[in-house]
Image (tube, rainbow, N blue to C red):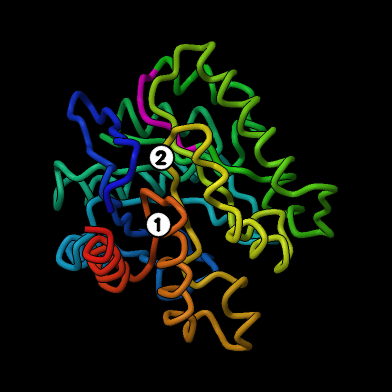
């Protein structure tokens, strides 16, 4: 899907072209992620998941060791690092060259993942709000950073989220944080609107309706709506039954400027990208 803007990110000296959307497969090394089918615990489970992501057309892998679903249990940084260490060992054995992002809001976890485990990108659900050392850390590490919009914490974010003007507040949020990162010398920034994080059902669909407004920042946009409650609550189904809804929203997200789709179901998302590209070209 060629756009007016050509996005690239530098991953360990290799330029990754995002002018055509990429599919990022989710790999959760947690026991309590909201979508049970995405949890992989054993070394063999992780190995099979990596192979599946690649075979189905995934170009990136997002590894999470801390469940950020609403009300999830908190785990220590030490536990998060240990989970990641086990998972990344297998990921790098199976796929030494695929770009890997680490889903964490802790700077010490980010540093260990990049310096010790061979990860490439930091994906921070908190936009630097839950650890004030995150921005300086990623800038010093010199790796791409996914800046997501959220208010509160994973434990509190869905307790009556309120906005006077949703899009204005989100745009201001990103403008302030992008400037802070730029002042620290951060080069590659990817924006994540934060679907499902500190947002009601209505907030999520208002955000999706106006997602193209984020293009004002001239930065790539990552969208993660895969099997989320904004789909299964509206359709009155379960996360297990939310693939069709996910495909529909991924299609809309691409039409509104998404550069990366973060998904559980890689094959379906890769097909969405291929079909949307064909329509554009």
Q: Residues within 10 Å of mark 1 (few under 14, many from 20)?
A: many
x and y percentages locating residue 141 in the rendered image:
38, 19
x and y percentages locating residue 1 in the rendered image:
28, 54
Q: Secondary structure at mark 2?
A: loop
**In the displayed structure, does residue 217 sit left or right of residue 250?**
right
Q: Is residue 68 magenta?
A: no
**Residue identifier under label 2:** 220
Residue 76 seen by the camera: yes
Taking the spot 30% from the left edge, 31% from the top edge, the residue there is 9
x and y percentages locating residue 177 in the rendered image:
61, 26
Residue 42's image quarter?
A: bottom left
**Residue identifier under label 1:** 262
Depicted 276 relative to depicted 216: above or below:
below
- N-term-proximal mark, 2 vs 1: 2
Point out the frontmost of discs 2 and 1.
2
Residue 105's image quarter?
A: top right
**Contact, CB < 8 Å: mark 2 with mark 1?**
no
**Range covered by the magenta-colored residues:** 141-146
Identify which residue, 125 or 192, lies in the foreground. Answer: 192
**In the displayed structure, does residue 125 sit left or right of residue 81?**
right
Residue 44 seen by the camera: no
Q: Secondary structure at mark 1?
A: strand
**In the displayed structure, does residue 204 sit left or right of residue 19?**
right
Residue 172's image quarter?
A: top right
Q: Residues within 10 Å of mark 2 (few under 14, many from 20)?
A: many
Q: Is residue 144 magenta?
A: yes
Taking the spot 62% from the left edge, 28% from the top edge, the residue there is 175
Identify which residue, 136 or 146, lies in the foreground. Answer: 146
Quadrant containing the C terminus is: bottom left
């Amino acid at each position: 899907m060629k756009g007016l803007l050509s996005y690239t990110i530098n991953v360990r000296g290799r330029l990754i072209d995002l002018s055509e959307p990429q599919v990022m497969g989710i790999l959760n090394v947690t026991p309590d992620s909201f979508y049970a089918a995405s949890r992989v615990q054993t070394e063999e489970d992780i190995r099979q998941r990596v192979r599946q992501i690649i075979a189905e057309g995934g170009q990136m892998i997002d590894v999470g060791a801390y469940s950020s679903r609403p009300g999830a249990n908190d785990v220590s940084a030490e536990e998060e690092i240990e989970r990641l260490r086990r998972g990344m060992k297998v990921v790098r054995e199976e796929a030494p060259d695929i770009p890997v992002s680490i889903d964490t809001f802790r700077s010490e976890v980010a540093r260990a993942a990049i310096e010790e485990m061979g990860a490439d990108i930091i994906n921070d659900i908190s936009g630097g709000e839950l650890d004030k050392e995150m921005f300086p850390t990623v800038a010093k590490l010199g790796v791409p950073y996914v800046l997501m919009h959220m208010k509160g914490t994973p434990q509190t974010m869905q307790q009556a989220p309120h906005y006077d003007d949703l899009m204005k507040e989100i745009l201001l949020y990103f403008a302030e944080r992008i400037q802070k990162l730029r002042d620290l010398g951060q080069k590659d920034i990817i924006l994540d609107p934060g679907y499902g994080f500190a947002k009601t059902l209505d907030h999520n669909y208002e955000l999706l309706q106006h997602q193209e407004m984020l293009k004002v920042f001239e930065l790539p946009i990552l969208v993660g709506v895969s099997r989320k409650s904004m789909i299964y609550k509206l359709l009155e189904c379960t996360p297990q039954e939310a693939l069709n809804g996910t495909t529909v929203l991924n299609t809309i997200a691409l039409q509104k400027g998404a550069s990366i789709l973060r998904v559980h179901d890689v094959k379906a998302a890769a097909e969405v990208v291929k079909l949307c590209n064909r329509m554009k070209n």
